[in-house]
Amino acid sequence: MAQSSRPPDSEADDLFGKLDSLISKHQGALAARASPPSVPVLTEAVESQRSAGDIPVLDEAVDLSAPGGVIAEKRRQLQVALYLRLRQRLDAELQQAISTHPAFVAAEAEPALARIAQELRAALPQIVRDSVAQVLGPDGTPE
């Protein structure tokens, strides 16, 4: 077996030296990549304009009507949807009653039926408002 000209301790030192240089090379590259970009740093103290005895006061007005406005708008949308649905249902029921019962089409029944249908259509908005108020309460929250 051929022996190297270096003693065994010298080879181990050389191997560890190479490992150390490889590790330091990679750690330097990682440190360069990981360093954050230069960020401005506050070096001067900021003095407060307030004296020690001052009490902080709210200077801005807060609009409290905005949440109520959203609730009012949602309530209105619900009322419109309910009205349209009930109106369609009323018209469909009247048409079905007229088509299935020929007596409703008679000359004397036609004006009375038209008057009743018109009164029901006119009452629908109030019925819907009352129903929504009964379910949601006057302030818009469910009771």
Image (cartoon, rainbow, N blue to C red):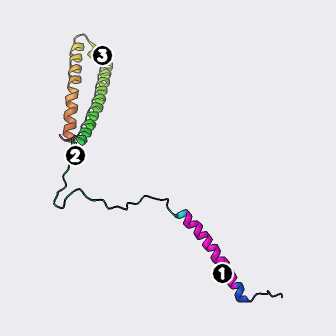
Q: Nearer the viewer, residue 9 or 49?
A: 49
What SS does tag 2 mark? Answer: loop
Residue 34 lies left or right of residue 110; in this view the side is: right
Q: Is residue 23 above or below residue 63?
A: below
Highlighted magenta segment, given as a residue range: 12-32
Q: Earlier in the sequence, mark 3 or mark 1?
A: 1
Q: Earlier in the sequence, mark 2 or mark 1?
A: 1
Residue 92 lies left or right of residue 63; in this view the side is: right
What SS does tag 1 mark? Answer: helix
Compute the Cα span from label 2 to label 1.
69 Å
**In the rendered image, which residue does mark 3 sit on?**
102
**In the rendered image, which residue does mark 2 sit on?**
60
Tell me which secondary structure the magenta stretch mostly adopts.
helix
Measured from the top left, where is residue 32 in percent x and y?
A: 56, 64
Q: Nearer the viewer, mark 3 or mark 2?
A: 2
Measured from the top left, where is residue 123 in percent x and y?
A: 20, 25
